[in-house]
């Protein structure tokens, strides 16, 4: 009998990394960007909570959020979101 790793349970994954369905105009690029935007939002929430609980300094939080923003911005540019509309 093998023990199940609780960190791999679908319920825990859904709790830690909630995903919401996409409701905009469907294109593959929009769908990918939506997923990237949700991940950005999730990460910013974690950093904000760590800062509020004294685990990160505001300067560290700013640096991490800025890094996440740059990643999101690159993905937006690579996917062509907002260009030619």
Image (cartoon, rainbow, N blue to C red):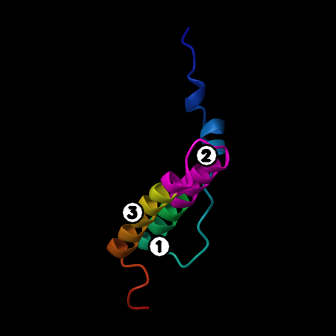
The quadrant the C terminus occupies is bottom left
Q: Between marks 3 and 1, how big is the CA–CA gap? A: 16 Å
Q: Is residue 82 magenta?
A: no
Q: Is residue 83 above or below residue 39?
A: below
Residue at 39% x, 63% y: name it.
Answer: 71
| Secondary structure category for the residue under label 1 | helix
User: Who is closer to the viewer here, 22 or 60?
Assistant: 60
Residue at 54% x, 79% y: name it.
Answer: 25
Q: Is residue 52 magenta?
A: yes
Residue at 64% x, 36% y: name it.
Answer: 12
| Secondary structure category for the residue under label 2 | helix
User: Who is closer to the viewer here, 18 or 55?
Assistant: 55
Classify 10 Å Cα crowding around label 2: few (below 14), some (14-19), many (20 and above): some
Q: Nearer the viewer, mark 2 or mark 3?
A: 2
- Say whether residue 7 is left or right of residue 69: right
| Secondary structure category for the residue under label 3 | helix
* Image location (x, y in percent) of residue 28: 42, 70
Residue bearing mark 1:
30
User: Who is closer to the viewer here, 70 or 7?
Assistant: 70
Q: Nearer the viewer, mark 3 or mark 1?
A: 3
* Image location (x, y in percent) of residue 49: 64, 49
Q: Between marks 2 and 3, how big is the CA–CA gap? A: 20 Å
Span shown in magenta: 39-61
* Image location (x, y in percent) of residue 48: 61, 53
Residue bearing mark 3:
71
* Label annotation for residue 50: 2
* Label annotation for residue 44: none
Classify 10 Å Cα crowding around label 3: few (below 14), some (14-19), many (20 and above): some
The majority secondary structure of the magenta stretch comes to helix
């Amino acid at each position: 009998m093998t023990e199940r790793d609780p960190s791999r349970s679908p319920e825990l994954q859904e709790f830690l990394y909630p995903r919401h369905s996409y409701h905009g105009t469907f294109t593959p690029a929009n769908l990918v960007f939506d997923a990237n935007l949700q991940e950005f939002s999730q990460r910013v929430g974690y950093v904000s909570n760590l800062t509020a609980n004294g685990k990160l300094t505001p300067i560290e939080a700013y640096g991490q959020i800025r890094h996440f923003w740059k990643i999101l911005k690159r993905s937006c540019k690579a996917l062509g979101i907002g260009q030619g509309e």
